[in-house]
Image (cartoon, grey):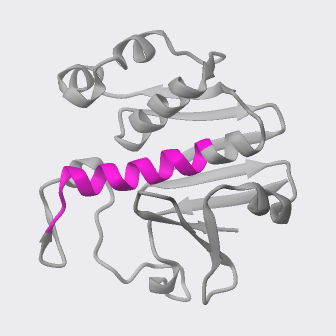
């Protein structure tokens, strides 16, 4: 099994103890706050959210996975979800999803957005072929049963080895960047 971490945090700003030096946003709820004298906007958030979703969907496409199974699930603050305009169309999913649900790629995209916005928490898998979950402060963990080098060759996103040889920087077309740590 190969473990990957997708994160928005630049690994070059990490101390030897693993702490990040930059003052950065960590949540959807940080929209409107200021970081490094710049207001964090909804567009900034959505660019990063899209980068995460696109990266995971790209892994699914490379592995020819069209659906994932919900293996763990927690729902939070459902009332807020219904008031958020960005969740139109996701109400059916949030009402019907449960542990054991098999969800297609569009639903996977929607559940990832709900997870990143901290409305639900879930772990998803496709047997032993792929396992994915998002953790605290917007870090996504992917476990795939596929050789890393071969997978990187298949990905449509560009991967670059960073100065820290333990990391691959992934540039996702038309979105912001994410960092992929192996």
Q: How many marks?
A: 0
**Residue at 79% over, 57% down:** 151
Q: Quadrant of the C terminus?
A: bottom right
Front position in the image: 181 or 173: 173
Image: magenta residue range: 39-57
Q: Is residue 38 left or right of residue 103?
A: left
- Which x, y percent locates residue 126? 75, 31
Q: Is residue 165 magenta?
A: no
- Which x, y percent locates residue 31? 18, 53
State the predominant SS element of the stretch in magenta. Answer: helix
Front position in the image: 120 or 83: 83
Q: Please say if 112 is above or below 97.
A: below
Q: Please say if 77 is above or below 53.
A: above
- Which x, y percent locates residue 30? 21, 55
**Residue at 42% over, 78% down:** 20
**Residue at 69% over, 40% down:** 61
Q: Quadrant of residue 159?
A: bottom right
**Residue at 54% over, 33% down:** 122
């Amino acid at each position: 099994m190969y473990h990957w971490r997708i994160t928005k945090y630049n690994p070059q700003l990490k101390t030897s103890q693993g702490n990040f030096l930059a003052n950065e946003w960590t949540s959807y709820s940080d929209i409107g706050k200021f970081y490094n004298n710049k207001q964090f906007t909804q567009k900034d958030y959505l660019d990063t959210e899209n980068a995460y979703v696109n990266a995971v969907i790209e892994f699914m496409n490379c592995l020819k996975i069209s659906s994932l199974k919900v293996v763990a699930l927690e729902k939070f603050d459902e009332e807020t979800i219904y008031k958020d305009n960005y969740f139109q169309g996701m109400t059916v999913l949030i009402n019907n999803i449960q542990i054991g649900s098999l969800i297609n790629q569009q639903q996977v995209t929607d559940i990832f957005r709900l997870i990143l916005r901290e409305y639900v928490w879930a772990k998803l898998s496709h047997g032993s072929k792929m396992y994915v979950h998002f953790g605290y402060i917007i870090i996504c963990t992917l476990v795939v049963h596929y050789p890393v080098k071969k997978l990187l060759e298949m990905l449509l996103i560009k991967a670059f080895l960073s100065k820290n040889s333990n990391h691959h920087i992934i540039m996702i077309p038309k979105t912001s960047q994410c960092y992929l740590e192996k």
